[in-house]
Amino acid sequence: MSGPQNGSAPPTTNGAGPNELEVLCREMQAKVDNFLDTPTEDEVLNSVKNQIIVARGVIDEALRRYRPEELSLSYNGGKDCLVLLILILASLPTSVSLQSSSTQSSSSPRPFPRRLQALYIRPPLPFAEVDEFVATTSALYHLDLTTSNQPMKPALTTYLRERPEVKAVFVGTRRTDPHGADLTFFDETDADWPRFMRIHPVIDWHYREVWGFIRALHIPYCPLYDKGYTSLGGTDDTHPNPALKGGKGSNSDPNGQQFRPAYELMEDREERLGRDR
């Protein structure tokens, strides 16, 4: 499997004419559909195609259960939630058009949203590169982003108090993440947490499938991944992955050590070797 080091941004509109989010979503839909329709003998890319079909089914179900204004996305600029964001965008054109407003006739489609709600919970010591990527992509993908510096539980409590219409949150957790082993596609939060439905469309994706998707679709990603980081937290607990140290195509870290880019890692079990927790 081959692909670019980092993708190029989708075209932007000038604010005139059609709903910019709708234009972007239809571009993402065409991009994903074209990928699905293009034959390949690459084993990873064929696995990615299967995962896309499953994930879009989960997203479609979420959009049947909830109105767009009742949904939000947990977004920290990492690779997993980036894949999830692109899939949500690609799913909206068909899913939203199938829902009719209760205040309109059954044949009237619900108005296409102009922005997607999202929450960025910053770690205590965030990477500047991550903050910049979150800001850039939030504008690029038309996110209505709330940023919180609180720990996760109080951040969610505050967010849901300020946005009581939110009933469910898309989360990019995967099976190999901490606390991900027993999750399903739809899970209510535990009793001692703020109440909402957690939606996990990419829960069963493997590490190399995440990167297969990002690179095949030329999706821009956080530049830290090109420096050997494979799982992003804060500057106090995240380091380049030692499994990627040295070799052809390496990039130097601040200490002059050479690390290959994140997409060269193949094994799920090695993904968090650069994390202290």
Image (cartoon, grey):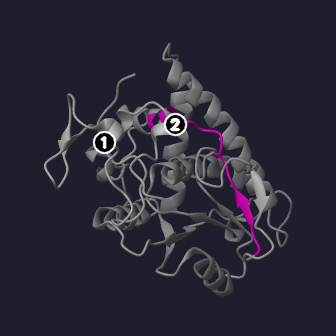
Q: Residues within 10 Å of mark 2 (few under 14, many from 20)?
A: some
181 relative position to 145: left or right: right
Q: CA distance from mark 1 to mark 2?
A: 21 Å
Which amino acid lies under the numbered mark 2 shown in the image of this protein? Answer: Asp
Mark yes or no: residue 6 visible.
yes
Q: What numbered label is drawn on residue 60? A: none
Indicate yes or no whether the magenta region holds residue 210.
yes
Instruction: Indicate the quadrant where residue 158 lies.
Output: bottom right
Magenta stretch: give its range. Answer: 195-211
Q: Secondary structure at mark 1?
A: loop
Indicate whether 173 appears above or below 159: above
Q: What numbered label is drawn on residue 268? A: 2
Indicate whether 238 appears above or below 26: below
47 relative position to 3: left or right: right
Q: Position of residue 257 (x, y in %)?
A: 17, 45
Q: Earlier in the sequence, mark 1 or mark 2?
A: 1
Instruction: Indicate the quadrant where residue 46 lies.
Output: top right
Which amino acid lies under the numbered mark 1 shown in the image of this protein? Answer: Asn
Mark 1 — residue?
A: 6
Q: Secondary structure at mark 2?
A: helix
